[in-house]
Image (tube, rainbow, N blue to C red):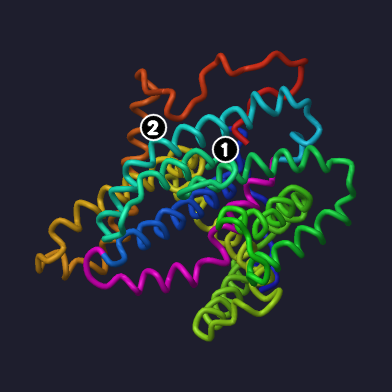
Amino acid sequence: MWGSLWRSEQPSRDGRVEWVDAGKGLAIALVVLFHSARWFAGVAGDVSGWLWINDLLATMRMPLFFTLAGLFAAKWAKAPLAQLWNAKLRLFVWVFLLWEVLGLGPYLLGQAAHGIEINPRREVFDTAISPLIPRFELWFIWALALFFLLNKALRAVPTAVTLPIAALASVIGFTGILPFPSPSWTGVCKYYVFFLIGMTWRRALFAYAARSGWILRSLVFVSWAAAAWAVTVFDLSGLPGLYPALACLGVLAGIAISQVLQRSAWLVGLGSRTLPVYLAHTPIVILLAAAVSLIADHAVVRSAAPVLPAAAALAAIGLSLGLYRISRRTFFRFLFDPPPRLLVAHPAGPTSAAR
């Protein structure tokens, strides 16, 4: 029996860690599903079941994403700023600014499909200040850039100081006891601690992933699922500290699931290409929702409403990856890759990395 509790670490594939890629694939799939359900809500039929499921998954979705993003971030805190710019920040800044503009048209179309009045002057202003207050779902890219900069600025500060402060900020962000200028800033406060956990507790997380067998994985997952169900059903998320603590358990449950899902080549492949999916999926989902809104009164659409968010999410993932593959072979490469002229000279050291 105890032999099932712990197992040996599995070898990696081509220098990548398969369970990490599987975890990223799981996280991005949950993110796309979340946005799909939100944009299809109120367009055609009842999708409240998906909204409830997304609430249930909230303590795994973004905490897992940010934790996995932090696993390989430590080396960049010590790298020269020019190297950090070339390898990380250049990409984040470019795609964030570009897709803030590209996403505006579909966003306005989605607003119109939901019957929301559009104020052109306000939309232009909000887009102009998006580097300070991000719009749409691109705040994740913006937050990652900010987290890498914070790590570099705070590299001399002991973890014993930064982690408790980040944890306190997370409690404040989740409970909403202080106002923030936008959901993006709230998200930064909520999730920076998970990025730090991934970076500073990397060895512990890898050891947990390497040694956990099916019994331990099952115990962790069932504990998280039961707690998440109770918090969602009884609306306990406002209790100070409860939600971040449950999110920590959600990260462990997500890693446990990733250990199982690493057998899926599709999910591992998705996890190695999360950026194009994150960038392109929302405009695609909005366009799909807007198209459905035109025939929303049709009986077929009404009867298919319960499956539309999931179907749209799968379609958005496939189309995003397709757009990425096409862009790599054409002039549209700039959609996902910053131009080389943005590179700056730097001394020898870490240059670019997939991690």
Residue type, mark 1 in image: Arg
Q: Which residues are magenta?
A: 43-72
Q: Earlier in the sequence, mark 1 or mark 2?
A: 1
Residue type, mark 2 in image: Tyr
- Nearer to me, 299 or 17: 299
Image quadrant where residue 116 sits: bottom left
- Nearer to me, 256 or 225: 225
90 in relation to 110, above or below: above
Q: Is residue 345 magenta?
A: no
Mark-to-mark CA distance, 1 and 2: 23 Å
* Residue at which label 1 appears: 13
Q: Is residue 305 left or right of residue 338?
A: left
- Nearer to me, 199 or 117: 117
Q: Residue at x 39, y 32 (%)?
A: 324
* Residue at which label 2 appears: 324
Q: Secondary structure at mark 1?
A: loop
